[in-house]
Image: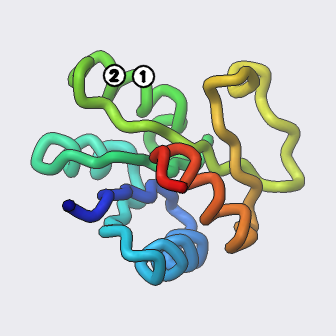
Amino acid sequence: MPRPRVLVVTDDAQTAERIRTILASEHYDVDTASRAAEAFDRFSRQHYDLMLTSIRLPDVDGPRLYWSLRERWPSGYPRVIFLVPASTPTPGDLTGSEVAVLPVPVAPDVLREMVRHALGVF
């Protein structure tokens, strides 16, 4: 069975590395991107099962990146977890039962549980 592929999209290098390290230790294949354009390029070359993305990126916001991926690859878009600074109220468009929001800084146990839940791995 192939390992789940995860893409972490954030311009915060420390957060990206922390998430990559935690998920790699759980046997996920993890790539990172610092901009939405880079993430879009990666998706054009590789399928990802899950994307963790900052709500604010230097070139496009995370929700817009996600919706762009859904439009471009309607049958292959990834599940998504939005990274939101703990000190920032969750934006209204990121509330609802289908939206997963992970506070940053990331708590390892919360990250692991959210990723397992998003991927249906228990």
**Mark 2 sits on what residue?**
70
Pinpoint residue 41: horizontal percent, then vertical percent: 19, 46
Image position, residue 36 (x, y; %): 38, 44
Query: Looking at the image, can residue 34 be seen?
Result: yes
Secondary structure of residue under mark 2:
helix
Callout 1 secondary element: helix
Q: Amino acid at mark 1?
A: Trp
Q: Which mark is residue 67?
A: 1
Residue 58 visible here = no
In-image side of 3 versus 60 (left or right): left
Q: Is residue 57 left or right of residue 24?
A: right
State the mark number for residue 87. none
Quadrant in which the C terminus appears: bottom right
Q: Position of residue 71 (x, y in %)?
A: 29, 16
Cβ–Cβ under 8 Å for marks 2 and 1? yes
**Structural distance between the alpha carbons of marks 2 and 1:** 5 Å
Q: Amino acid at mark 2?
A: Arg
Q: Residue at x 37, y 56 (%)?
A: 7
Task: Name the one closer to the observer, 86 or 100.
Answer: 100
